[in-house]
Image: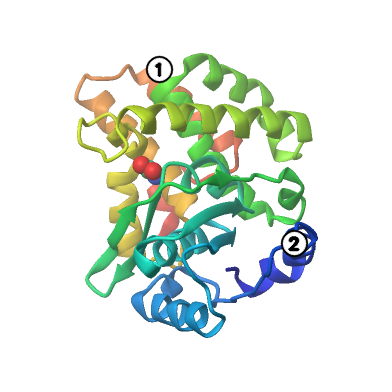
Amino acid sequence: VTVPAVGRRHAAPLVRSLRGAGLRVHRFTVPDGDATKNLRQVKRLYDGFLEKGLDRSSAVVALGGGMVGDLAGFAAASFLRGIAFVQVPTTLLAMVDASVGGKVGVNLAQGKNLVGAFYQPQLVLCDLDTLKTLPNRELRAGLAEVIKYGVILDEEFFGYLEEHVEDLNQRDPEVLADVVARCCQLKASVVEQDERETTGLRAVLNYGHTFCHAIESVSGYDRLLHGEAVALGMVLAARYSARHGDLSLTDAERLTRAVDAAGLPSEIAALQLP
Ligand code: GLY
């Protein structure tokens, strides 16, 4: 399951490789954009799966960003009560966050991600070559979630990011590989301890997301990429904490500098929201 632009760039080698392993492969393309993450598209996938004769031995491979992973993952979780699922994320954000941890689902008219499941993929395959064609803005949006891991779980990693932000902006393959691997380790360790967000631990991954969701809701979801809203949300949360005496102003400013250095928005005023 993929979206048109990602399919054009990356589907052929994946399909070749799966066919080379003796598997039958069918390609399902869904429209791009978060508005696609809905029950109508899930139903279209079910119809396609049935038409092509998928059964309980089949697997769904999500090739793309977070939206594709959420949508295809939810279809995999529910089709025939659940068939195998593989994530092949092609954006930095999906590699470091969305593809790991098993959250899949769709939006309803009433709100985002209101229907879904915790459904772990059998495999998450991050091929860093796919990042070579990722637009700059999308790369930067992924960096917001990367910075988030440094803030919530790993100060040393945060220092590494401060030191290597230019390498990341230039897509240095070794730095990118280190960063993706570290983020996946950090996320996996949280999810292993609190898969279903029942103890409050996994909620730490939502750092910055309260302000982020408010900003996305006010700005109509199409103005900012999710990572951009996360960046702003983290800065606002840090300033809020600093104002309430729970975080030093120095740390809040350090985060703001990291967000600025990654080319992400840190000032809500600059957005001129309605
Ligand atoms: N993106 C937050 C989580 O997976 O829990």
The picture quadrant where one finds residue 260 is top right
Q: Does residue 94 sit above or below 5 in this rendering?
A: above
Q: Which residue is mark 2?
A: 22
For residue 62, which quarter of the picture? bottom right
Q: Residues within 10 Å of mark 2 (few under 14, many from 20)?
A: few
Residues 64 and 51: in front is 51
- Rounded to the nearest angstrom, the CA distance separating label 2 from label 1 is 57 Å
Number of dots carrying numbers: 2
Left or right position of 258 against 118: right
**Residue where numbered disc 1 is placed:** 250
Dot 1 crowding, Cα within 10 Å, few <14, some 14–19, many 20+: few
Answer with left or right where residue 9 lies relative to residue 33: right
Question: Above or below — where is 146 with respect to 245?
Answer: below
Q: Is residue 113 above or below residue 143?
A: below
Ligand 1 shows up in the quarter that is: top left
SS at mark 2 in the image: loop
| Image-quadrant location for residue 210 | top left
**Residue 126: x, y in percent?**
65, 44
> Mark 1: which amino acid?
Thr
The residue depicted at 48 percent of the width and 65 percent of the height is: 72
Q: Quadrant of the C terminus?
A: bottom left
Q: Could you say which is closer to the camera, residue 85 or residue 117?
A: 85
SS at mark 1 in the image: helix
Q: Report x, y in % for residue 30.
A: 54, 76
